[in-house]
Image (cartoon, grey):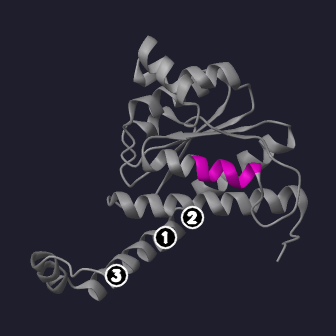
Amino acid sequence: MASSPPRDVKAADESLDLEGTFRARLQASADAKLALLDELEPCLAVARALIDAYRAGNSLFVFGNGGSAADAQHIAAEFLGRYYLERPALAAHALTVNTSALTAIANDYSYDEVFARQLRALGRVGDVAVGITTSGNARNVLQALIAAREMGIVAVALTGARGGLALDAADHWVRVPSDDTPRIQEAHITIGHIWSELVEAALFGDRRTE
């Protein structure tokens, strides 16, 4: 038989406005995404860059820290596997997944270099590199964007409202007009999903699977 929660836990639960919080956060998430309707041109420019890169046989690289690392892996998976369509795999690399490389580079050089050094080894002219940082100031993301531009790789900064230092380090700046980190991250995944759909449609036609 399950035991009852401690009295202080019950009291805390009763003091929370559960429904109000859910409604407020859902509305804030929707508002952040709707605000992207005024930010479409940078989003579309990156979609075009991705389509051109894949048509030329190039690759996508995605990277970030923490929740943005998870977002990088999620976005890369949509291209490697499939989004809507049954189609050939598209080359996409999340630079967050090789723990041996990450820790070796951080230990031997610095944490600022963990993405840039991988990109220098694996990237080539015409690829696309998407650095995800809600603040726009993550130093390892900035270093990788700088390396990308030096290598002739299309550098994309995916950030929150302010952009930070990343807006000057990238060829394309895609911003979510919010300063609330969770809402920014939720919108980043939406953007990644739409990019996946547009690339699939451009390369393979609008043949959605059920």
Query: How far is disc 3 from disc 2 in space, using C-alphas?
Result: 19 Å
Q: Give the magenta part as a residue range.
A: 73-80
Q: Which residue is mark 3?
A: 22
Dot 1 or dot 3, earlier in sequence: 3
What secondary structure is found at the residue carrying circle 1?
Answer: helix
Measured as percent of width and height from the top left, residue 39 is found at 52, 62
Measured as percent of width and height from the top left, residue 81 is found at 77, 53
Residue neighbourhood size for the residue with mark 1, other residues' Cα within 10 Å, grouped as few (<14), some (14–19), many (≥20): many
Q: Point out the frontmost of discs 1 and 3.
A: 3
Task: Give above or below for 46 relative to 126.
Answer: below
Q: Which residue is mark 2?
A: 190
Q: Residue at x 55, y 60 (%)?
A: 189
In the foreground, 113 or 143: 113
Identity of the amino acid at label 3?
Phe
| Residue 118 visible somewhere in the drawing | yes
Task: Give above or below for 158 relative to 155.
Answer: below
Query: How far is disc 1 from disc 3 in space, using C-alphas?
Result: 17 Å
Residue 61 — which label?
Answer: none
